[in-house]
Amino acid sequence: MTHPFSALPDAEPGCVLCTQASGVPLWQDDARRVIRAEDADFPAFYRVIARHHVAEFSALLAPERARCMDIVCRIERVLVEQLRPTKINLAALGNVVPHLHWHVIARFDWDSHFPQPIWGARQREVAGGPLARLPLSLQDLDACVVDALRSRD
Amino acid sequence: MTHPFSALPDAEPGCVLCTQASGVPLWQDDARRVIRAEDADFPAFYRVIARHHVAEFSALLAPERARCMDIVCRIERVLVEQLRPTKINLAALGNVVPHLHWHVIARFDWDSHFPQPIWGARQREVAGGPLARLPLSLQDLDACVVDALRSRD
């Protein structure tokens, strides 16, 4: 799924994350959007995407960094509580699209790439597909994520 | 280089990051150590390693998360200012060693893997090696990192 963003005045021409994003849109505030990436290998994969065009995390002021990481942590906690993953992976890379976005990914010792990063070499096929291994549906997981974000202090 | 850590009372038996770390030790406070990883492909590669054994970032209390990300940002800013990299990559993965550590890596469009993550497929060989492309020595870069960490408010 690809959905349009309402571009902010500082949108960078040609930056795909200034104007649209793939994935399932879940929540937004004035400065960030949260989507679920639609990755067949890693179904419990969320992104926190800055609405303003900044490349690096350190370009944010300290209060904005704190809000950003609070959102990352709220998603992480939902994944830990609901899925009991082997590990959470957090990353802000942006080599291809240099517009700040955080990946929040639940990893499992049975997943296709574990213990490699999701960008590393595939280790195995997952019989039946990874979705079938999750203890709840993605729709229910999304609802838990949205609840956690809406309940922010 | 591998150097011993003074293990804290909550050290996890068998956790290599509770008791030692490879890399060049640069700085520490009560809760974190900073080392430069010694990676031939990515010479400007630093790690912020929690001293206490926690697996996930969200296990830290909010003030500790803020301090941790402040340190990550100070390192990031030094790399941006001193090296003018194409991008900074931040990541907390820990699939192999589930003890919280942040990677802070300067990436360049000429580096061996760009735009792939460092864990992805090699894209090219770097003639002369990456160290020769940096505008200052690693010792000078380390000194800038240490200065930035020591000047924390």
Image (tube, coloured by chain):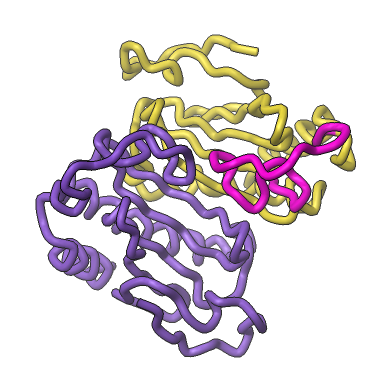
Chain colours: A purple, B yellow
- Asked if A88 appears above or below A70 in the picture, the reply is above
Query: Was residue B114 drawn as part of the magenta stretch in this picture?
Result: yes
Magenta: predominant secondary structure element? loop
- Name the residue at 45% across, 25% down: B51
Query: Was residue B19 drawn as part of the magenta stretch in this picture?
Result: no
Q: Position of residue A99 (x, y in %)?
A: 58, 68
- Considering the image in quadrants, where does the C terminus of chain A appear? bottom left
- Name the residue at 80% across, 30% down: B138
Q: Is residue A6 left or right of residue A152?
A: right
- Asked if A149 appears above or below B57 in the picture, the reply is below
Q: Is residue B140 left or right of residue A74?
A: right
Q: Position of residue A11 (x, y in %)?
A: 61, 83
Q: How many marks?
A: 0
- Asked if A152 appears above or below A92 in the picture, the reply is below
- Name the residue at 27% across, 55% down: A44
- Name the residue at 36% across, 29% down: B98
The residue positioned farthest toward the left in the image shown: A135
Q: Position of residue B65 (x, y in %)?
A: 43, 46
Bounds of the magenta segment: B106-131
| Residue B75 visible in the shown view | no
Q: Position of residue A17 (x, y in %)?
A: 53, 75
In depth, the one of A125 and B107 nearer the eye is A125
- Considering the image in quadrants, where does the N terminus of chain A appear? bottom left
| Residue B85 visible in the shown view | yes
The quadrant holding residue B103 is top right
The quadrant holding residue B97 is top left
